[in-house]
Amino acid sequence: MFEGISIFVIVLLVLIVATIFQAVRIVPQGFNYTVERFGRYTSTLTPGLGLIVPFIDRIGSKMNMMEQVLEVDRQEVITRDNAMVTVDGIAYFQVLDAAKASYEVNQLELAILNLTMTNIRTVMGSMDLDNLLSQRDEINLRLLGVVDQATSPWGVKMSRIEIKDIAPPKDLVDAMARQMKAERDKRATVLEAEGERQAAILKAEGEKQAVMLEAEGRKEAAFRDAEARERAAEAEATATNLVSVAIANGDVQAINYFVANNYVKALESLASANNQKVLMLPLEASSVIGSIGGIAEIAKEALNGRGGNSATARSAPRKRPAGTVPPVAQG
């Protein structure tokens, strides 16, 4: 009898332990467990220690709540301008509602993958090849918006959809390379022509400035020459006036100075002529020397006059040098 009681106690303890194990569930971090009672969803167990009714409730699905990644297989896409390209990509998603992800769709990852591939063909097939290659960010945004809206009833949030590679056919790549080379050659030719045009403009502008500066220089030189001639004429007029006054006052040396000065200038102009190699003048050298001596007498008289005795020097008789022009009688 005691053996039967012992067996009953042991069986009871085993049942209690099994019941506890059936009632207690430990959910790891990053997962949610759905609870089903007689095959119907009742609740969701979050990470940590969870309790269910043993032998009545059971765990329906263990849903990963972390962000997950799906590789989108390579597929061929025909663009709007009938170009065939090969495309692959990658998609990131996260389950927000474990119950919807478990019971609203069957094979969640396969459904997201097929939906993404279908929309890649739809979005990229509505674009030209040039836009397809240059507007990858716009393609990613359009794909993300369409797929995220489609998976929202499944309790899924699409984080990102990225196109990894777009591979046109080899012949199309070669044609694009030739087109790019031709475009660059065209740009180089245009830039070279523009450079030559700019250089010609700058050269013409420089020549224009040079001509203007040269004309301005000639104008300034002519103005200076005219001013110099004007001053020389004024000096000559002043000298002539002074000589006239001196002659009117009876100064004979002034006449000698005037005649000798013009005499020397005439000889100088004759000697400096380019077409004269030998100069034969029927003139006496003593006359020229006498004229120069007359000029020297005038200079001496001017120096004596500054000493304060000009009146005495004027009244004293002077000896006329040989060969000088005789005094002119006053009228």
Image (cartoon, rainbow, N blue to C red):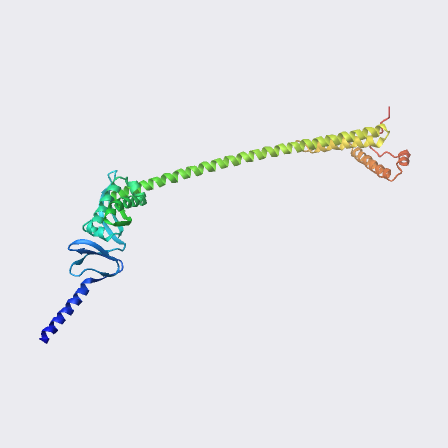
Tell me which corner region of the image, top left, top right, bottom left or bottom right, holds residue 231. Answer: top right
- State whether residue 52 is above or below residue 219: below
Residue visible at 78% across and 29% down? 240
Q: Quadrant of the C terminus?
A: top right
In the image, 268 versus 25, the foreground residue is 25
In the image, 313 versus 163, the foreground residue is 163
Q: Is residue 152 visible?
A: yes
Task: Report whether 5 appears left or right of 162.
Answer: left
- State whether residue 253 is above or below residue 184: above
Task: Report whether 264 appears left or right of 114.
Answer: right
Q: Quadrant of the N terminus?
A: bottom left
In the image, 118 versus 204, the foreground residue is 118
Residue 278 place in picture, x, y as percent: 69, 33
In the image, 101 versus 281, the foreground residue is 101
Of all residues, the one furthest to the bottom in this rendering is 2
Q: Is residue 85 visible?
A: no
Residue 92 place in picture, x, y as percent: 27, 51
Residue 118 place in picture, x, y as percent: 22, 44
Task: Report whether 60 appears left or right of 262.
Answer: left
Of all residues, the one furthest to the top in this rendering is 331
Tell me which corner region of the image, top left, top right, bottom left or bottom right, holds residue 289. Answer: top right
